[in-house]
Image: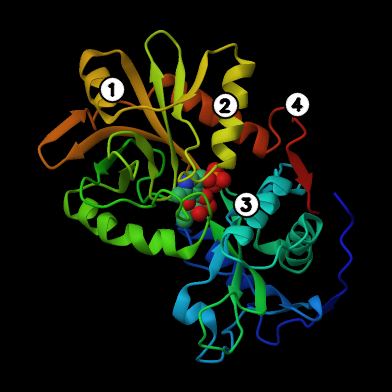
Amino acid sequence: MNAAALTYRVVPSSHARSAEQRAAILAGELGFGKYFSDHMVAIQWDKTQGWHDATVCAYGPLSLDPSASVLHYGQEIFEGIKAYRHADGSIWTFRPEANGARLQRSAARLALPQLPVAEFVESLRQLVAIDHAWVPSAPESSLYFRPFMIATEAFLGVRAAQAAGYYVIASPAGAYFAKGVAPVSIWLSEDYARAAKGGTGAAKCGGNYAASLLPQQEAQAHGCSQVLFLDPVEGKYLEELGGMNVFLVFKDGRIVTPALSGSILEGITRSSILQLARDRGLAVEERQVAIDEWKQGVASGEITEVFACGTAAVVTPIGELKGKDFAVGDIHAPAGEVTMSIRKELTDIQYGRLPDRHGWLVRLR
Ligand code: PLP
Ligand code: COI
Protein backbone atom coordinates (compact mmCIF):
# COMPACT_ATOMS: atom_id res chain seq x y z
CA MET A 1 0.00 0.00 0.00
CA ASN A 2 1.46 3.37 -1.03
CA ALA A 3 1.61 6.09 1.60
CA ALA A 4 -1.20 8.63 1.87
CA ALA A 5 -0.22 11.84 0.13
CA LEU A 6 -3.08 14.29 0.61
CA THR A 7 -2.55 17.18 3.00
CA TYR A 8 -5.54 18.00 5.17
CA ARG A 9 -6.87 21.40 6.10
CA VAL A 10 -8.41 21.10 9.56
CA VAL A 11 -11.19 23.55 10.42
CA PRO A 12 -12.48 22.71 13.89
CA SER A 13 -16.24 23.01 14.42
CA SER A 14 -17.42 26.26 16.00
CA HIS A 15 -20.39 24.43 17.53
CA ALA A 16 -18.89 21.15 18.78
CA ARG A 17 -20.82 19.61 21.66
CA SER A 18 -19.38 20.20 25.14
CA ALA A 19 -17.71 17.34 27.03
CA GLU A 20 -20.87 17.11 29.19
CA GLN A 21 -23.20 16.94 26.19
CA ARG A 22 -21.05 14.27 24.58
CA ALA A 23 -20.84 12.26 27.80
CA ALA A 24 -24.64 12.38 28.14
CA ILE A 25 -25.06 11.03 24.60
CA LEU A 26 -22.44 8.30 25.06
CA ALA A 27 -23.97 7.24 28.39
CA GLY A 28 -27.43 6.80 26.85
CA GLU A 29 -28.93 4.18 24.57
CA LEU A 30 -26.78 4.63 21.46
CA GLY A 31 -28.60 2.28 19.12
CA PHE A 32 -27.33 2.50 15.55
CA GLY A 33 -26.85 5.56 13.36
CA LYS A 34 -28.72 8.06 15.52
CA TYR A 35 -25.90 10.31 16.76
CA PHE A 36 -22.98 11.81 14.90
CA SER A 37 -19.62 13.12 16.01
CA ASP A 38 -18.73 16.80 15.64
CA HIS A 39 -16.62 16.59 12.48
CA MET A 40 -16.44 14.96 9.09
CA VAL A 41 -13.88 14.44 6.36
CA ALA A 42 -14.44 15.80 2.85
CA ILE A 43 -12.19 15.24 -0.18
CA GLN A 44 -13.02 16.48 -3.65
CA TRP A 45 -12.22 14.87 -6.98
CA ASP A 46 -12.46 16.07 -10.51
CA LYS A 47 -11.14 14.85 -13.78
CA THR A 48 -8.45 17.48 -14.14
CA GLN A 49 -7.17 17.81 -10.57
CA GLY A 50 -7.75 14.27 -9.29
CA TRP A 51 -8.21 14.02 -5.50
CA HIS A 52 -7.74 17.39 -3.83
CA ASP A 53 -8.99 19.73 -1.14
CA ALA A 54 -8.93 17.25 1.75
CA THR A 55 -10.53 18.81 4.81
CA VAL A 56 -11.66 17.92 8.28
CA CYS A 57 -14.55 20.25 9.04
CA ALA A 58 -17.71 20.57 11.13
CA TYR A 59 -20.30 17.84 10.61
CA GLY A 60 -23.12 19.47 8.71
CA PRO A 61 -25.23 19.71 5.56
CA LEU A 62 -23.59 19.37 2.17
CA SER A 63 -24.19 21.94 -0.49
CA LEU A 64 -25.00 20.26 -3.80
CA ASP A 65 -26.08 21.61 -7.13
CA PRO A 66 -29.65 20.39 -7.77
CA SER A 67 -28.44 18.85 -11.01
CA ALA A 68 -25.67 16.85 -9.31
CA SER A 69 -25.76 13.38 -10.85
CA VAL A 70 -26.02 11.57 -7.51
CA LEU A 71 -29.49 13.07 -7.07
CA HIS A 72 -30.74 11.82 -10.44
CA TYR A 73 -28.88 8.66 -11.33
CA GLY A 74 -27.87 7.34 -7.93
CA GLN A 75 -24.14 7.37 -8.58
CA GLU A 76 -23.17 6.70 -4.96
CA ILE A 77 -21.16 4.15 -2.99
CA PHE A 78 -20.39 3.70 0.70
CA GLU A 79 -18.57 1.68 3.32
CA GLY A 80 -19.18 0.65 6.93
CA ILE A 81 -16.28 0.16 9.35
CA LYS A 82 -15.83 0.66 13.08
CA ALA A 83 -13.32 2.05 15.57
CA TYR A 84 -13.00 0.07 18.80
CA ARG A 85 -11.67 1.41 22.09
CA HIS A 86 -9.40 -1.04 23.89
CA ALA A 87 -9.09 -1.30 27.66
CA ASP A 88 -5.93 0.88 27.66
CA GLY A 89 -7.80 3.68 25.88
CA SER A 90 -6.13 3.12 22.49
CA ILE A 91 -8.36 3.17 19.39
CA TRP A 92 -8.20 0.54 16.66
CA THR A 93 -9.98 -0.37 13.48
CA PHE A 94 -10.46 -3.71 11.77
CA ARG A 95 -9.06 -4.64 8.33
CA PRO A 96 -9.42 -1.13 6.88
CA GLU A 97 -7.42 -2.07 3.78
CA ALA A 98 -10.16 -4.57 2.96
CA ASN A 99 -12.84 -1.87 3.19
CA GLY A 100 -10.66 0.49 1.17
CA ALA A 101 -10.21 -2.15 -1.53
CA ARG A 102 -13.96 -2.85 -1.56
CA LEU A 103 -14.66 0.87 -1.93
CA GLN A 104 -12.39 0.78 -4.98
CA ARG A 105 -14.29 -2.18 -6.45
CA SER A 106 -17.59 -0.41 -5.80
CA ALA A 107 -16.18 2.73 -7.42
CA ALA A 108 -15.13 0.76 -10.49
CA ARG A 109 -18.64 -0.70 -10.88
CA LEU A 110 -20.37 2.67 -10.39
CA ALA A 111 -17.93 4.49 -12.68
CA LEU A 112 -16.68 6.64 -9.80
CA PRO A 113 -13.02 7.53 -9.20
CA GLN A 114 -10.90 5.20 -7.07
CA LEU A 115 -9.64 6.61 -3.82
CA PRO A 116 -6.22 5.08 -3.01
CA VAL A 117 -6.51 2.61 -0.13
CA ALA A 118 -3.91 4.52 1.88
CA GLU A 119 -6.04 7.68 1.57
CA PHE A 120 -9.09 5.72 2.76
CA VAL A 121 -7.23 4.58 5.89
CA GLU A 122 -5.81 8.06 6.42
CA SER A 123 -9.31 9.58 6.22
CA LEU A 124 -10.38 7.43 9.19
CA ARG A 125 -7.25 8.42 11.09
CA GLN A 126 -7.91 12.11 10.44
CA LEU A 127 -11.45 11.90 11.76
CA VAL A 128 -10.39 10.00 14.87
CA ALA A 129 -7.59 12.50 15.51
CA ILE A 130 -10.18 15.22 16.12
CA ASP A 131 -13.20 13.17 17.31
CA HIS A 132 -11.51 10.45 19.38
CA ALA A 133 -13.60 11.35 22.41
CA TRP A 134 -16.64 10.09 20.45
CA VAL A 135 -15.32 6.51 20.49
CA PRO A 136 -17.43 5.02 23.27
CA SER A 137 -16.03 2.65 25.87
CA ALA A 138 -19.15 0.77 26.99
CA PRO A 139 -18.97 -2.98 26.25
CA GLU A 140 -19.62 -3.83 22.59
CA SER A 141 -19.94 -0.20 21.60
CA SER A 142 -17.88 1.43 18.85
CA LEU A 143 -17.62 4.44 16.58
CA TYR A 144 -19.16 3.44 13.25
CA PHE A 145 -17.59 5.20 10.28
CA ARG A 146 -19.67 5.77 7.20
CA PRO A 147 -17.31 6.67 4.34
CA PHE A 148 -19.22 7.48 1.14
CA MET A 149 -18.69 8.88 -2.32
CA ILE A 150 -21.14 10.81 -4.47
CA ALA A 151 -21.14 12.15 -8.02
CA THR A 152 -21.32 15.92 -7.70
CA GLU A 153 -20.99 17.16 -11.26
CA ALA A 154 -23.78 19.57 -12.23
CA PHE A 155 -24.89 17.91 -15.45
CA LEU A 156 -28.03 16.04 -16.44
CA GLY A 157 -26.54 13.97 -19.22
CA VAL A 158 -26.38 10.28 -18.43
CA ARG A 159 -22.70 9.46 -18.20
CA ALA A 160 -20.10 8.98 -15.48
CA ALA A 161 -19.73 12.22 -13.57
CA GLN A 162 -16.49 14.13 -13.89
CA ALA A 163 -16.63 15.46 -10.32
CA ALA A 164 -17.16 13.58 -7.09
CA GLY A 165 -16.92 14.07 -3.36
CA TYR A 166 -15.72 11.56 -0.76
CA TYR A 167 -16.86 12.04 2.83
CA VAL A 168 -16.55 10.25 6.15
CA ILE A 169 -19.01 10.75 8.97
CA ALA A 170 -18.93 8.87 12.28
CA SER A 171 -21.65 7.63 14.59
CA PRO A 172 -21.17 6.24 18.10
CA ALA A 173 -22.99 2.91 18.02
CA GLY A 174 -24.38 0.29 20.35
CA ALA A 175 -26.44 -2.70 19.26
CA TYR A 176 -27.77 -2.66 15.67
CA PHE A 177 -30.95 -4.50 16.61
CA ALA A 178 -33.14 -3.00 19.29
CA LYS A 179 -33.06 -6.19 21.36
CA GLY A 180 -29.24 -6.50 21.30
CA VAL A 181 -27.80 -9.97 20.60
CA ALA A 182 -30.94 -12.05 20.50
CA PRO A 183 -32.21 -14.37 17.76
CA VAL A 184 -34.05 -12.49 15.02
CA SER A 185 -36.78 -13.50 12.59
CA ILE A 186 -35.97 -13.25 8.90
CA TRP A 187 -38.43 -12.78 6.04
CA LEU A 188 -37.82 -14.62 2.78
CA SER A 189 -38.42 -12.19 -0.07
CA GLU A 190 -40.21 -14.25 -2.70
CA ASP A 191 -41.36 -11.40 -4.95
CA TYR A 192 -38.35 -9.12 -4.99
CA ALA A 193 -34.65 -9.57 -5.75
CA ARG A 194 -31.98 -7.29 -4.33
CA ALA A 195 -29.67 -7.50 -7.30
CA ALA A 196 -29.58 -8.68 -10.88
CA LYS A 197 -27.22 -10.87 -12.87
CA GLY A 198 -24.60 -8.44 -14.13
CA GLY A 199 -26.03 -5.74 -11.86
CA THR A 200 -24.57 -3.97 -8.85
CA GLY A 201 -25.15 -6.57 -6.11
CA ALA A 202 -21.44 -7.01 -5.39
CA ALA A 203 -20.94 -3.24 -5.04
CA LYS A 204 -21.84 -1.34 -1.89
CA CYS A 205 -24.00 1.28 -3.57
CA GLY A 206 -27.06 3.08 -2.28
CA GLY A 207 -29.29 1.73 -5.05
CA ASN A 208 -29.01 -1.83 -3.72
CA TYR A 209 -30.36 -0.65 -0.38
CA ALA A 210 -33.10 1.43 -2.00
CA ALA A 211 -34.23 -1.74 -3.77
CA SER A 212 -34.32 -3.60 -0.45
CA LEU A 213 -36.55 -1.15 1.41
CA LEU A 214 -39.92 -2.32 0.11
CA PRO A 215 -39.18 -5.99 0.91
CA GLN A 216 -37.80 -4.77 4.25
CA GLN A 217 -41.19 -3.12 4.94
CA GLU A 218 -42.86 -6.38 3.97
CA ALA A 219 -40.57 -8.18 6.45
CA GLN A 220 -41.49 -5.79 9.22
CA ALA A 221 -45.18 -6.18 8.47
CA HIS A 222 -44.66 -9.90 9.13
CA GLY A 223 -42.80 -9.31 12.39
CA CYS A 224 -39.35 -9.91 10.91
CA SER A 225 -36.32 -7.69 11.32
CA GLN A 226 -34.46 -8.45 8.07
CA VAL A 227 -35.06 -9.78 4.58
CA LEU A 228 -33.36 -12.76 2.97
CA PHE A 229 -32.85 -12.48 -0.78
CA LEU A 230 -32.48 -15.33 -3.22
CA ASP A 231 -30.43 -15.40 -6.38
CA PRO A 232 -31.93 -13.23 -9.09
CA VAL A 233 -31.71 -15.81 -11.87
CA GLU A 234 -33.41 -18.92 -10.54
CA GLY A 235 -34.88 -17.56 -7.31
CA LYS A 236 -33.64 -20.71 -5.63
CA TYR A 237 -30.32 -20.10 -3.92
CA LEU A 238 -29.53 -18.01 -0.85
CA GLU A 239 -27.73 -14.77 -1.45
CA GLU A 240 -27.73 -12.58 1.63
CA LEU A 241 -29.82 -10.36 3.86
CA GLY A 242 -30.54 -6.72 3.13
CA GLY A 243 -27.43 -5.70 5.07
CA MET A 244 -25.65 -8.89 6.14
CA ASN A 245 -24.18 -12.15 4.86
CA VAL A 246 -25.54 -15.47 6.07
CA PHE A 247 -24.03 -18.70 7.47
CA LEU A 248 -25.47 -22.14 8.25
CA VAL A 249 -23.98 -24.48 10.85
CA PHE A 250 -24.48 -28.20 10.29
CA LYS A 251 -24.83 -30.92 12.92
CA ASP A 252 -21.59 -32.50 11.71
CA GLY A 253 -19.72 -29.24 12.38
CA ARG A 254 -19.59 -27.90 8.82
CA ILE A 255 -19.97 -24.16 8.35
CA VAL A 256 -21.57 -23.18 5.05
CA THR A 257 -22.07 -19.80 3.41
CA PRO A 258 -23.29 -18.89 -0.08
CA ALA A 259 -20.40 -18.59 -2.55
CA LEU A 260 -19.77 -15.14 -3.97
CA SER A 261 -22.03 -15.10 -6.99
CA GLY A 262 -21.31 -11.72 -8.47
CA SER A 263 -24.46 -10.33 -6.89
CA ILE A 264 -23.53 -10.85 -3.20
CA LEU A 265 -21.61 -8.25 -1.22
CA GLU A 266 -18.25 -9.71 -0.18
CA GLY A 267 -18.45 -9.05 3.55
CA ILE A 268 -15.31 -8.47 5.56
CA THR A 269 -17.00 -10.08 8.55
CA ARG A 270 -17.86 -13.05 6.31
CA SER A 271 -14.25 -13.47 5.23
CA SER A 272 -13.00 -13.10 8.82
CA ILE A 273 -15.45 -15.75 10.07
CA LEU A 274 -14.38 -18.14 7.31
CA GLN A 275 -10.80 -17.69 8.54
CA LEU A 276 -11.71 -18.17 12.21
CA ALA A 277 -13.68 -21.32 11.34
CA ARG A 278 -10.73 -22.70 9.35
CA ASP A 279 -8.43 -21.89 12.26
CA ARG A 280 -10.67 -24.06 14.43
CA GLY A 281 -10.24 -26.91 11.99
CA LEU A 282 -13.91 -26.78 10.97
CA ALA A 283 -14.91 -27.82 7.47
CA VAL A 284 -15.89 -24.68 5.62
CA GLU A 285 -17.92 -24.61 2.43
CA GLU A 286 -18.55 -21.65 0.15
CA ARG A 287 -21.12 -22.94 -2.30
CA GLN A 288 -24.64 -22.56 -3.62
CA VAL A 289 -27.19 -23.23 -0.91
CA ALA A 290 -30.75 -23.87 -2.05
CA ILE A 291 -33.48 -22.34 0.09
CA ASP A 292 -35.01 -25.82 0.35
CA GLU A 293 -31.79 -27.08 1.95
CA TRP A 294 -32.26 -24.48 4.70
CA LYS A 295 -35.94 -25.30 5.20
CA GLN A 296 -35.44 -29.06 5.22
CA GLY A 297 -32.17 -28.94 7.17
CA VAL A 298 -33.62 -26.88 10.00
CA ALA A 299 -36.77 -29.01 10.10
CA SER A 300 -34.75 -32.26 10.21
CA GLY A 301 -32.14 -31.02 12.68
CA GLU A 302 -29.33 -31.38 10.11
CA ILE A 303 -28.79 -27.63 10.32
CA THR A 304 -28.38 -26.65 13.94
CA GLU A 305 -27.69 -22.91 13.71
CA VAL A 306 -28.10 -20.07 11.24
CA PHE A 307 -26.58 -16.66 11.68
CA ALA A 308 -26.10 -13.37 9.89
CA CYS A 309 -22.97 -11.26 9.93
CA GLY A 310 -21.83 -7.77 9.05
CA THR A 311 -19.95 -4.85 10.51
CA ALA A 312 -22.97 -3.10 11.97
CA ALA A 313 -24.61 -6.10 13.66
CA VAL A 314 -21.43 -8.25 13.99
CA VAL A 315 -22.86 -11.78 14.33
CA THR A 316 -26.60 -12.13 14.86
CA PRO A 317 -28.36 -15.44 15.45
CA ILE A 318 -31.29 -16.14 13.14
CA GLY A 319 -34.02 -17.86 15.12
CA GLU A 320 -36.65 -18.20 12.49
CA LEU A 321 -37.18 -17.95 8.72
CA LYS A 322 -40.66 -17.02 7.52
CA GLY A 323 -42.21 -16.79 4.10
CA LYS A 324 -45.67 -16.40 2.64
CA ASP A 325 -46.73 -19.93 3.49
CA PHE A 326 -44.12 -21.41 5.81
CA ALA A 327 -42.03 -20.80 8.92
CA VAL A 328 -39.01 -22.79 10.08
CA GLY A 329 -36.96 -22.50 13.25
CA ASP A 330 -37.84 -21.42 16.75
CA ILE A 331 -37.46 -17.78 17.65
CA HIS A 332 -37.62 -18.65 21.35
CA ALA A 333 -34.72 -21.11 21.24
CA PRO A 334 -31.48 -19.74 22.71
CA ALA A 335 -28.76 -18.49 20.36
CA GLY A 336 -26.58 -21.31 19.03
CA GLU A 337 -23.27 -22.20 20.66
CA VAL A 338 -21.15 -21.97 17.51
CA THR A 339 -22.75 -18.64 16.60
CA MET A 340 -22.05 -17.15 19.99
CA SER A 341 -18.54 -18.52 20.27
CA ILE A 342 -17.57 -17.14 16.83
CA ARG A 343 -19.15 -13.84 17.79
CA LYS A 344 -17.14 -13.80 20.99
CA GLU A 345 -13.87 -14.69 19.30
CA LEU A 346 -14.33 -12.01 16.65
CA THR A 347 -15.28 -9.28 19.11
CA ASP A 348 -12.50 -10.36 21.49
CA ILE A 349 -10.01 -9.77 18.67
CA GLN A 350 -11.62 -6.45 17.71
CA TYR A 351 -11.59 -5.18 21.30
CA GLY A 352 -8.04 -6.38 21.97
CA ARG A 353 -9.02 -9.10 24.43
CA LEU A 354 -7.42 -11.82 22.29
CA PRO A 355 -4.16 -11.71 20.33
CA ASP A 356 -4.57 -10.35 16.80
CA ARG A 357 -2.98 -13.40 15.16
CA HIS A 358 -3.93 -12.42 11.61
CA GLY A 359 -2.76 -8.81 11.86
CA TRP A 360 -6.30 -7.52 11.28
CA LEU A 361 -6.16 -4.53 13.63
CA VAL A 362 -4.81 -1.13 12.68
CA ARG A 363 -4.21 1.44 15.37
CA LEU A 364 -5.85 4.81 14.75
CA ARG A 365 -4.77 6.50 17.97
N1 PLP B 1 -24.13 -7.72 2.77
C1 PLP B 1 -24.69 -6.50 2.71
C2 PLP B 1 -25.77 -6.27 1.73
C3 PLP B 1 -24.23 -5.48 3.56
O1 PLP B 1 -24.77 -4.26 3.53
C4 PLP B 1 -23.20 -5.77 4.49
C5 PLP B 1 -22.73 -4.74 5.39
O2 PLP B 1 -21.79 -4.08 5.18
C6 PLP B 1 -22.65 -7.05 4.50
C7 PLP B 1 -23.14 -8.00 3.63
C8 PLP B 1 -21.54 -7.41 5.42
O3 PLP B 1 -20.35 -6.79 5.05
P1 PLP B 1 -19.23 -6.44 6.12
O4 PLP B 1 -19.01 -7.67 6.90
O5 PLP B 1 -18.06 -6.04 5.32
O6 PLP B 1 -19.77 -5.33 6.96
C1 COI C 1 -22.75 -2.53 7.76
O1 COI C 1 -22.82 -3.57 8.39
O2 COI C 1 -21.79 -1.76 7.81
C2 COI C 1 -23.80 -2.14 6.84
O3 COI C 1 -23.52 -1.38 5.98
C3 COI C 1 -25.15 -2.70 7.00
C4 COI C 1 -26.21 -1.64 6.93
C5 COI C 1 -26.17 -0.70 8.09
C6 COI C 1 -26.25 -0.97 5.61
For mark 2, does the 10 Å Cα neighbourhood hold few (<14), some (14 to 19), or many (20 or more) residues? Answer: many
CA separation in Å, label 4 and label 3: 19 Å
Give coordinates of residue 202: x percent, y percent: 51, 49
Disc on res. 357: 4
The residue drawn where x is 55% and y is 42% is 267
Residue 79 or residue 315, whichever sits in front? 79
Which numbered disc flags the more N-terminal residue, 2 or 3?
3
Residue matched to label 2:
274
> Which corner quadrant holds the C terminus?
bottom right
Query: Quick one: label 1 or label 4, which is nearer the N terminus?
Result: 1
Q: Which mark is residue 82?
A: 3
Q: Three-letter amino acid code at disc 2? A: Leu
Q: Residue at x 23, y 51 (%)?
A: 219
Which dot, 1 or 4, sits closer to the camera? 1
Instruction: Identify the element where label 1 is drawn.
Output: helix
Q: For mark 1, what is the residue? A: 293
Query: 10 Å neighbourhood of mark 4: few (<14), some, or many (≥20)?
Result: few
Q: Disc 4 versus disc 2: distance between alpha carbons?
A: 15 Å
Q: Quadrant of residue 149?
A: bottom right
Indicate the amino acid at tag 3. Lys
Hey, what amino acid is under mark 4?
Answer: Arg
First in sequence: mark 4 or mark 2? 2
Q: Position of residue 142 (x, y in %)?
A: 60, 52
Residues at discs 3 and 1 in contact (Cβ within 8 Å): no
Alpha carbons under labels 2 and 3: distance apart? 20 Å
